[in-house]
Image: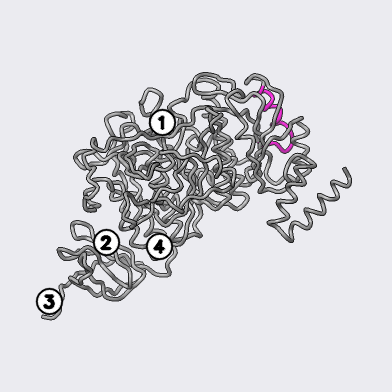
Amino acid sequence: MKVAAFLMSLILSVSGLFQMAWTTVADTVSEMIYGIPCTSEAINAKVLDEICDADVVALNDGTGYVPDLLLVFLDEGISFRERLTALRGAGLSVAGWCAPANLYVVRCVPTGLETLQARCAAIEKNSGVAIASPVITGRIETQSFPDDPFDFHGSNLAKEWDELDPEGANWWLEAVNARQAWDYSALFQPVVAGIVDNGYQLDHPDLTGKISFPTARLAKRSSIEAHGSHVAGIIAAIQNNGLGSTGLCPHASLMCADWAPTEKQHWNTDLTVLFGMVEVVKAGAKAVNFSLGVTASLEDNEAGFYYREIEPRIVSYTMASLLRKGYDFLIVQSAGNGNAYGFPVDAINNGQFAGITERTAFPGLTGVKKQEILDRVLIVAAASLKWDGTIQLASYSNYGTRAEIAAPGSHIYSTVPEDDYAYFSGTSMAAPVVAATASLVWSVDPALTGAQVKRILLENADPARVLPNDETPEWTTPYPMVNAKKSVEAALRGTAAQTVTVTGTAPAGATDVRIGGMTHTVYSDGSFTFVSTELEGVAEALDADGQVLASAQLQAEAGETVTISMTPPAEEAA
């Protein structure tokens, strides 16, 4: 053992010189000798694929637990020896780990849930242990349903764009001012969005080359599913390729994880979602989308207590551990599509990150404040376009104070398997609209923190645009609608040395206004508003063929908002 310890010490000292190669070697040797890795970045998720139906004890039709597994989160910053002592002192055999989250999956003697909970309470008293919990399984569900496009009054794919009157297959892009956000594409930098969902068609013509996986294990276990493919298309379907849809952040790369059970598994574990989140963040994802939840299967039993009280501590501690290690991100989760009876309820019941509140947030000894965790979670309600052109909270959408923003969620046209496209509805569709907007903001200013991106999205949303509906009379407060244009412009103002806001009205037939090499889209009523980094120059109104219809001289001070008057060329000559 002394020789082994000497070898470990030698490897650890040399690993600082050759970080990438020696870190792997050090972890491999440490696992062989001690049963756990020695670095803070190692992940071993094989145990997740080994859990099968025979391993689960059901509590009811929707939830259960694994009788011989526990989750143990260790305190941030403890030494390797202290980690060993904390795990071995509790008599635990380590089966897997997610070191960036200080998480270890351990085996124990199979027993009932009540005994497991008592065991966890005892383990938490040990020095170095932050949280201990049983492994709960359940029906984590995607939160969408397919639509018949012939039931949607605006299903005409060829409709012209009109942000002032959203309609058709691209209504959701119109409603968030996507084209006006894309006007700033020359300023966009590469960005990686994360998706933790139930599978993806990697070679869909509108997604080809978009999707990557953090590890070979995740690439191997990923299936081809409609839901994950649809979410991926909403965020980043390829633009201007002549095919069916465009993602809101089409230049984004997608780092994905598949949380769905494998062929031998019919139960979901929160562990799969948790590991997926850590792995995509570790691989570079910034805005991470979770179109999932447990509202429809949540019941008032032991598992219900877990989802409301224990799970928020687990996911918030995972977030705090990542933040402490220097990772930054924004978690975007769907609010949920109602309970088992189809009635919308408070979004706090949707599990995962939706349950994190000031009371339930748990940063442990990471040094991260509760507010820093809350500032990196954004729960999204779904908006629906009504026949009269108004936008309301969708009849199925959960609501409440935990859902801080809304986005289009009904009749959303996007990619599905077999190289096809379809309309889906649900809060599952609303969440990726917000995740894509966050990605646009990050692509303008990569230096922003997750908290700053969330604040930009909330402060630049269209206030009270999403009206209450008749299905939720107890919730009568309108929701703000995410606005991609305003959010991108807010990021630009924060990063550019000088900007000016330009407004005005273009002559009939104008589609764009050009200044300083950038072109900005004109609304259907002829009005325009945009942020320019040029404080002086000639602004030109262009028609669809690029012909100049009118022009105006711009001269302004930084920070000003100016209105310019377009003059036709004939009047200039006169």
Precedes in sequence: disc 1 or disc 4: 1
Counting residues from the start of the chain, the first of labels 1 and 2 encountered is: 1
Mark 2 crowdedness (10 Å alpha carbons): few <14, some 14-19, many ≥20 = many
Categorize mark 4 by other alpha carbons within 10 Å: few (<14), some (14-19), many (20+). many
Q: Residue at x 42, y 57 (%)?
A: 251
Element type where label 4 sits in the image:
helix
Q: Amino acid at mark 4?
A: Leu
Magenta-drawn stretch contains 127: yes
Q: Secondary structure at mark 1?
A: loop
Is label 4 or label 3 in front? 3
Q: Which mark is residue 521?
A: 2
Quadrant assignment for the N terminus: top right
Depth check, mark 1 against mark 2: the one in front is 2
Sequence-first disc among 2 and 3: 2
What distance separates the C-alpha of mark 4 from that of mark 3? Answer: 35 Å
Q: Residue furthest bottom?
A: 573
Q: Secondary structure at mark 2?
A: strand
